[in-house]
Image: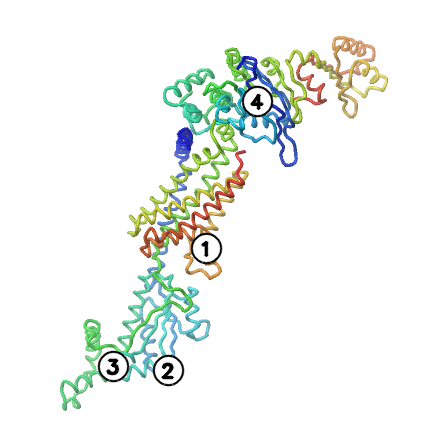
Amino acid sequence: MENKDLRQILAILAKEIKILTRDRQALALLFAMPAFFILVMSYALEGVFEGGSSSRPVEVAVINLDRGGLSREVISDLKGLEGIVLAEALDGVPMTQERAEELVRQGQYSLALSIPEGFSEKILSLSQDPAGRVAVTFIYDPATNIRLLSGIRGTLQGAILRRTLLATAPARFKKALASEMGPFAAFAGPDSKNMERQIDELLAKANKGGENEPEVKFLSRSPRGHASGRFPSATEQNVPAYTIFGVFFIVLTLASSFIQEKKEGTFQRILSAPLSQATLLIGKLLPYYLVNLIQIVLMFAVGVVFFRLKVGDPAALMIVSLSLVLAANGLGLLVASLARTEAQVNGYSVFLAIILSALGGMLVPAYIMPPFMKTLSLFTPHAWALAGYQDVIVRGLGAGEVLPEAGVLLFFAGIFFTFAWWKFRFR
Amino acid sequence: MSMTEPILRVEALRKRYDSAEAVGGISFEVLPGEFFGLLGPNGAGKTTTIGMLTGWIEPSGGQIEIRGMNLASRFREAKKMIGLVPQSFAFYSSLTAWENLSFFGRLYGLRGKALEDRSAFVLEIVSLADRADQAAGTFSNGMKRRLNIAIGLLHEPALLILDEPTVGIDAQSRIAILESLKKLNSEGMTVLYTTHYIEEAQDLCDRVAIMDRGKIIALDTPRALIQAQGKGIIRMEFHGTPDESLLGRIRTYGAVIWVDPPRRRIHLETDRTDLVLRELLDLKESRGALLQNLDVTEPDLETVFIHLTGRDLRD
């Protein structure tokens, strides 16, 4: 590329920036819209994720495979907990292990509690064999906010431990007295008035020191058939998702600008000057590329300032962003090459922005989508961009590890630009 | 290069779209300092021709040379010679006149003081110097047309190509534009001018090429074309339907080129307008009030076009 070309590209770029900055409404739409989405949706979803209060109780499915009385007492205790609603049956059908797993997988319940067979009998036997401890299993929806999940799980665990300790208290006292008082132990009985207080003290002691290992242990897992892993928080989902959503709105601005140039005859005039079509296209696209990058920086800044988002490796974010913006600009040029009127540009752009965002997991996280939709999401650049960003933000991966996602985004960009170049007419 | 060597040479230029041939193998030359008109009705192929001459539309065949340089192979050098004034207001409405000039000037390599001087000079030519800092979108149509011309003149092109530069403006702006163009041409600028306004072409052009349906059907000076092909047109309107004997008599005066279905209006082409008019007035005397209206167009480029195509230029 010669100096002359560069100067022409810079002239077109400067002109485009001047025009862009004079259309304040379009700029406001481009920047304010995704920022607005991030703020509104994050606050809105935060409320959902902070469920578990009395006004917004969390439903927990219960599978009770035990036939003893202790499990019934546990369930009765849990029913009395504030902010939790237990579901032992759905539509009149008792909860089975398989059904509960399916319902959690579908997102109908955030959490299921599975009490195993022989729960009461094993606990009351006061077995001290760690291998023989009874395992109560929590099955959680990975889409559930981690903080909500820990809170609810902690409350349930506390209540279960309390009931099991209460149930085993008489036998424990007997055991303790036998070791402390020897032959007088037979004349001593537990003071029933103070017993619950003493149990609570014992429970607190057990929780602190662990000297009295409880007879029950707790396991947590995602539903069977669901991939496990760390899932993003609302902010970690929303900031990159709505940034990507906003980035693709450049399609509308960019394609409209091309249609406008065609309509007003400015392309004809520019191309009558001594410059090539490629020079014109590069000069024309560059400002939109820059606008998109500024947009991304600002959107992540909103995440950092308002939601204390930890953004991870800047180089890795840069690699994903540069590739994402190229794909978005490619799609913009493709729309510009297919649309004949401004109405068509609006139609194509809004349709693509919404549909691709929804498919790509910008509006609803892809990991909670049904398998078919999840597969379909892989055909959108959005899903790959989000995966790239979340690799960096959620999983703390570096520049080298986001290259596959960046590569797919560049592949999308390549396809968009190739089709656009093939179909593009300057008239 | 000698002065008689053409500044623009077009050879068998063609443009074919999917289903139609917009320009069908036209050839012509424009000489240095010439004011050359491309005349034709809407849809004749003038704008497509201009598009090909300025590198905006790729020809389907033929050659374009600007000062001996092939436009396809040496487009950078060749295009520098051309200044285009498109039919549309081809500038940015949100930019000021000055900003528009700065942008387009930079595309031609103008920079710094040279760009500023040229911008100020062309704004002066089109009488927009006092509007330099006004957004172009706020201009009247006449001012927009003038700015359109200023941008085309900015890089001192050897050949200024104007596509219908006076469409949709008031008479005063039109006169101002035509005066500016005459002045530029008198100072040595070669102009290729397309229009469907006959008077403009007749008044301005040294030579005209008349285009119809993608072909050049005549090319010469306006005077030569009128002398060779021009005939007067007499338009008659009758109260009732003239009988066969009257129609037969009218046919002896010249060629009947148009009759409306009830035969109440007849257009007659003749090279003896004075004589025929006298005959028709006599006829009116002798046959009462049958003849209601008479309208005469003396031979001009319009009548040349009608003679060649049987159609009106403004169709």
Front in this rendered view, residue B313 or A331: A331
Using the rendered view, name the quadrant where residue B6 is placed.
top right
Q: Alpha carbon of mark 2 to alpha carbon of mark 4: how far?
A: 95 Å
Q: Alpha carbon of mark 3 to alpha carbon of mark 1: how far?
A: 51 Å
Asked if marks 3 and 2 fall on the same chain, the answer is yes
Q: Chain of mark 3?
A: A
Label 4 Cα neighbours within 10 Å, binned few <14 / some 14-19 / many ≥20: many
Residue annotated with mark 2: A67
Instruction: Tell me whether circle 3 and circle 1 mark residues in contact (CB < 8 Å).
Output: no
Front in this rendered view, residue B63 or A391: B63
Q: Nearer the viewer, mark 2 or mark 4?
A: 4
Instruction: Tell me whether circle 3 and circle 2 mark residues in contact (CB < 8 Å).
Output: no
Instruction: Tell me whether circle 1 and circle 4 mark residues in contact (CB < 8 Å).
Output: no
Q: Which mark is residue B82?
A: none
> At x 36% / y 65%, what residue is drawn?
A58
Q: Could you tell me residue B127's position as x and y percent? A: 46, 16
Q: Could you tell me residue A308's position as x and y percent? A: 28, 51
Q: Which mark is residue A378?
A: 1
